[in-house]
Amino acid sequence: MSERDDLLASVADTIKTYRTDELAQPTPAHVERWLSQFTPANQLAFLKEFDHVFKQTFFTKNKVEEFLQHLVTSKKIAGDTPAAYWQSAHFLKIQQNGQSQKEMLKLFAKCLYDKYGLEIDNCGKPDGDYIYLDDVIFSGNRVGNDLKQWIAEDAPQAAKVHVIVVAIHTLGHYLTERKLKEVIKKSGKKIKVIYWRALSVENRKKQRNSSGVLWPTAIPDVAEVQAYMDRPSKFPFEPRQAGSAVVAPFSSEQGRQVLEQEFLIAGVKIRSRTQNLDDVWRPLGYSSFGVGFGSMIATYRNCPNNCPLALWWGKPEDTSGALHWYPLLPRKTYADIENVFNGFDDDFDDLTT
């Protein structure tokens, strides 16, 4: 087999559990069809870097369960008597949009039962902490809005809330903290919010040179891209400065730039096929800033729209029109295109607050 064939098979194997029982299992031919839409001369380099990155950033159900199994026994959160701690805890079911909290609660419940024989619906005592589960914090809007309403309407006068996710993007973390501090102050309650995660992904503008998301160093000399960049923007693009240090999950600065450039070109191409696409649907993902969010995290359940458009946009059966782009990871629904799925790291020993 050629290097290209090997890489196609590797990517297909990485994503083989994507939306199991809903979609056909991805094959090398599926990956090839997606890859063929990018710049021909750059396809091999693009595929090589994508394969390296996605081995780290695509998370299966087993990977999520492994994280939660580690968490339920962690003394950092549950102390020396974790069974008693979790039996006292209140598990919040307050997510206003999406299904990710239900899925995380279901997986966490299985971990608790397997380890301690606890039924999650029977947990909760007057002195227990409160647990908010979700998969990933991207912009922070979901957890911020959920907890804002809970704090104002249903929270006790004093409480400790643990926000448990598998990954956090640093800007979303900052914005969530700021919002909730204001809400708590206004409520007059004594609420302490603690964040737990296995992975933090840097994406603050002031730290863009060491960011872990797609953040181009320059705009490619492509007419469509240049025209897109000439549009007025409240939060214009500010380039990343290339550095000598390699930032995870990328293999090299050169490989990273290939991903950034190709996803940007493809995303602009996708946008050009419709005149009615809101400005927040940017080439590198749903965002109000720059050229898009740029996350490379996806899970077995769905692909977040904070990822580059070229990763998830389109309908495989369409041969023309706005959705005429063959997606690698088709999103669960286009009926509700405003629905934002959120979406981890394998270094669970680095569990931090």
Image (tube, rainbow, N blue to C red):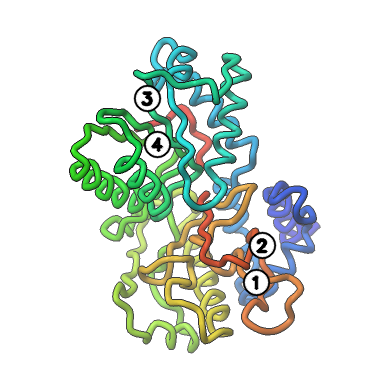
- Amino acid on which the number 4 mark rests in the picture: Val
Q: Residue 50, located in which quarter of the rendered image? A: bottom right
> Going from the N terminus, do you reach mark 1 or mark 4 first?
4
Q: Is residue 177 left or right of residue 123?
A: left
Quadrant containing the C terminus in the rendered view: top left
Tag nearer the camera, 1 or 4: 4
Mark-to-mark CA distance, 4 and 3: 11 Å
Question: Which residue in the structure is indicated by mark 4?
Answer: 163
- Amino acid on which the number 2 mark rests in the picture: Pro
Tag count: 4
Mark-to-mark CA distance, 2 and 1: 7 Å
Q: Which mark is residue 330?
A: 2
Question: Which residue in the structure is indicated by mark 1?
Answer: 314
Question: Which residue in the structure is indicated by mark 3?
Answer: 129
Residue positioned 39% across, 82% down in the render: 229
- Amino acid on which the number 3 mark rests in the picture: Asp
